[in-house]
Image: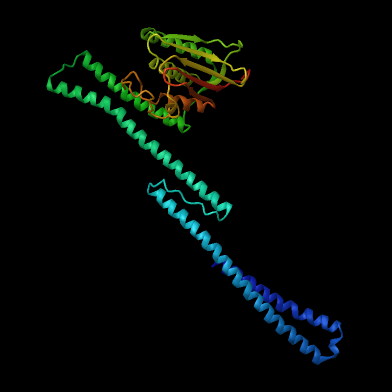
Amino acid sequence: MAQGVVVAAMALSVVVVAALVAPPLFDLHMREAGHDKQPGVLDHAETAFRDAGVVGLGAGVIIAVLGAVVVSGLLTRGLGRHLDALVDGAERVGHGVYNQPVPAVGGSRELDAVTEAFNDMAERIAASEQARRRMLTDLAHEMRTPIASLRVTVEALEDGFVDLDEHTVSVFHDQLSRLTRLASDIKDVSAAEEGRLDLHRELVDLSEVLAASGRAFGPQYTDAGVVLDIDSGTASGRRALVRADRARVGQVVDNLLRNALQHTPSGGQVNASADIPADAGEWVRIVVKDTGIGIDAHDLAHLFERFYRADTSRPHDSQTGTGVGLSISRAIAVAHGGTLTAHSRGPGHGATFVLTLPAAAVGS
């Protein structure tokens, strides 16, 4: 309707302008040619011009209007079909159907770009929804074990099979600690992934952070029969300085050392070092390399997802963590403008984790 109004207004403008401008201009030229002394000829010529103009202009305007209406109708019909397809696609997405993309009609580059963006949005929503469902499933699974343990213990107390002694209290304490840690981990990883981490940045030497974590985990490695080799000096002799939250970076290093210990059998070795790569002077990194069970290529792609465990055969007890440690660690690295990556040549070949952070400017 809007296009019809525009076409009608243009046609009316042409007719009005022609009616106002053409007759006086024609009369002027006829008088300049000397026909004003021949009234009969002048009147007949003006009548002929007017009739020819009305017929020619009218026919032209009618044909032009019809052509514009037909073309506009075809364009509007094609655009309408495409918009209807987008509306249907939006309704499907609203009802949770994400696997039916809107087809590209090839009508125009702009419409195809909108279609591509819409389909990409639907894929992202589908991925987020799948991750949400998997997270809820995994969260329920993680909570089931400690809750079941608490229920069994309470029932045993009620039935008189066990006494409220030190061992029973220890069971309560361990399972409640696991639930508390699970809630804390979920809060941390959500805050980190949403950019809501409260970072208290200061000038930090990664070598010192690594050395402190090594001292803390030393006894655990000794008890497990795993050699922990900490190299807190850089090859260049420069200090591995970053401007970061010391506690958060320490949390990442602790996670990496704990993860390496859990996946390295007795007799194995874990090497951890602070380094300033020669080919990347603006970056500082911590490398944790173990001789453990390794990581399958498929697992590498999902290793940093919430609750994901590459080694599903390991029991999920209070010592194995909640399965979000690597997710939190990567989110902390990203919040500092850095990265956390994992590498492995496959099962039986160990794994290497690399934490990379921006180097602090000298004097900062």
Front position in the image: 106 or 212: 106
Residue at 33% in and 24% down: 180
Front position in the image: 320 or 22: 320
Above or below for 162 versus 339: above
Residue at 82% in and 81% down: 28
Above or below for 343 versus 97: above
Above or below for 11 versus 319: below
Relative placement, left or right, of 162 versus 135 is left
Front position in the image: 273 or 32: 273
Q: How many marks?
A: 0
Above or below for 80 versus 329: below
Relative placement, left or right, of 339 versus 63 is left
Query: Where is the N terminus found, in terms of image quarters?
Result: bottom right
Residue at 53% in and 13% down: 207
The answer to whether residue 306 shows anywhere in this view is yes
Write down the quadrant of residue 55 in the picture: bottom right
- Pinpoint residue 127: horizontal percent, then vertical percent: 42, 39
Write down the quadrant of residue 49 in the picture: bottom right
Query: Where is the C terminus found, in terms of image quarters?
Result: top right
- Pinpoint residue 91: horizontal percent, then vertical percent: 41, 52
Q: How is the image coloured?
A: rainbow
Q: As drawn, which residue projects farthest toward the bottom?
A: 40
- Pinpoint residue 354: horizontal percent, then vertical percent: 51, 20
